[in-house]
Every structure is written in structure tokens, then in C-alpha cells.
Image (cartoon, grey):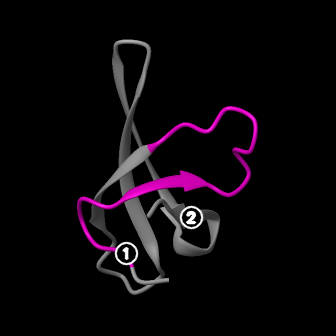
Amino acid sequence: MKLKIGDIVRLNSDVNVNVLMTVNGYSSDGQGFWYCVWFHGNMLMNGSFHDDALTKIE
């Protein structure tokens, strides 16, 4: 999957909650991890996820 900064994604395992995240960056180590941000209520959250764990929202 080809992602870029600004893409909207969700976790593949997140089938019931469907939290949408924004791709905010990528790891430079070549391991395929993307940095994402999302809101949980009014709190801004962030995390890194492997590209195999993400689905791009078209």
C-alpha cells in the first residue's frame, strides 16, 4: 500500500470502533512504520503502526 502524509487511515483490527487517523510521518529506518494522529474525545493521540496494519480510506 502506498501511503503519504495527510492520508486518512484506520487500523485493520479496528472493525467495530472505526477510529480514523491521519498519517503524520514515516519512519526513516525502512521498517515500514507510519506515524499517525487521531482524537480520543478532545485529546490528541499519536502512535506508530506498520503499513500492514493500516487501511487507507479512499
Q: Nearer the viewer, residue 28 or 44?
A: 44
Q: Residue 56's spot in the image, x, y percent? A: 48, 65
At x 52%, y 60%, the residue is: 49
Secondary structure under the numbered disc 2 in the rendered image:
strand
Sequence-earlier tag: 1 or 2:
1
- The residue tagged 1 is 3
- The residue tagged 2 is 55
Q: Nearer the viewer, residue 34 or 12?
A: 12
Where is the C terminus found, in terms of image quarters?
Answer: bottom left
Residue 22 versus residue 31 in the image, above or below: above
Residue 37 versus residue 4 in the image, above or below: above
Q: In the rendered structure, find residue 48 and report the number of the disc placed on it.
A: none
Q: Residues within 10 Å of mark 1 (few under 14, many from 20)?
A: some
Q: Residue 31's spot in the image, x, y percent? A: 47, 82
At x 54%, y 37%, the residue is: 19
Residue 24 falls in which quadrant of the image?
bottom left
Q: Residues within 10 Å of mark 2 (few under 14, many from 20)?
A: some
The amino acid beneath tag 2 is Thr
Q: Residue 47's spot in the image, x, y percent? A: 44, 46
Residue 50 versus residue 41 in the image, above or below: below
**Magenta stretch holds residue 50:** no
Residue 52 versus residue 10 in the image, above or below: below
The amino acid beneath tag 1 is Leu
- Highlighted range, magenta: 3-20
Between marks 1 and 2, how big is the CA–CA gap? 9 Å
